[in-house]
Amino acid sequence: MCTGRVDPAFIVRAFSNGADGVYVGGCWPGECHYTTEGNYHTLGTMLLMKRVLKYVGLNPDRLRVEWVGASEGIRFAEVMNDVSAKVKEMGPLGKSEGLDDKALKFKLEAVKNLLPYIKLVEKERLGGPFATAEEYSNFFASDEAERLFRELVADKLAVSQIMLLLGEGGRLTSGEIANSLGLDTSDVTRHLNSSARQGLLRFDETQKVFVVPGVKEQARA
């Protein structure tokens, strides 16, 4: 299968099912068997998803892409041994990043829910096309890519996490939400106020907490 068919959903599903690392191997750039140059598309997808993982608090090195030719058996073995060693060194997903199981679940679910939008953004604004692998790498390391990611993806990822957390019936302050999700308190407050103006959330003046209207609320301790 061409690596160009590797959907970001495959990556999120692997992590959600307990994988501590994901490796994608493809033909060397310029040696794609298809006229679509699928490995270039894959590189853009992988670089974007690494940025997504970093934003939600997961080590982006858990996702890795390497080029290995069909005749490079020795290189393939070396790459797989290195991938295995690096993942083992990083330790269990979430725990090594200081996230409990609940926070990890919210973060991966938030990414999953936003994937259709992320794929659209990649196609329209963050996916090139570029002519070389170096151009893809340079773009995603640039300030422009960071600006576009913050502008187009980061805020929506934060809101998605917040809504999932409150959607379980939580009655939480902005500080509690920030601590639970590992987000900046000022950013959380900004997202909460914006969501409340849109009617997505309700602010309980008596207890100074945010809740989701219509969701059965859990009692505060």
Image (cartoon, rainbow, N blue to C red):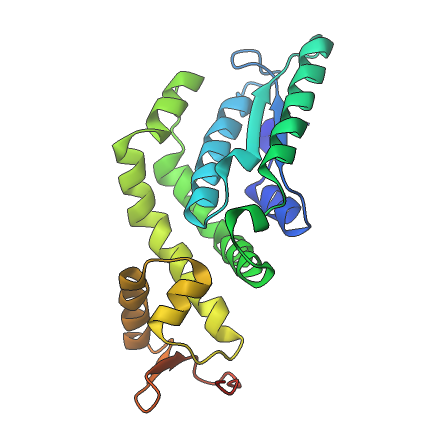
Q: Is residue 186 left or right of residue 163?
A: left
Determine whether 32 is above or below 107 in the image.
Answer: above
* Residue 36 position (above or below residue 113): above
Q: Is residue 48 visible?
A: yes
- Image: 80 above or below 11: above
What residue is rendered at 50% in x and 74% in y?
A: 167
Q: Which percent across, then down, holds residue 18? A: 68, 49
Which picture quadrant has residue 174?
A: bottom left
Judge from the rendering whether residue 35 lies leftward or rightward of residue 136; answer left or right.
right
Q: Which quarter of the image is occupied by the N terminus?
A: top right
Where is residue 78 drawn, in percent x and y? Answer: 67, 15
Percent position of residue 83, x then y: 63, 27
Residue 79 location, quadrant = top right
Q: Position of residue 61 (x, y in %)?
A: 52, 33
**Closest to the observer: 216 or 172?**
172
Image position of 19 with respect to 114: above or below: above
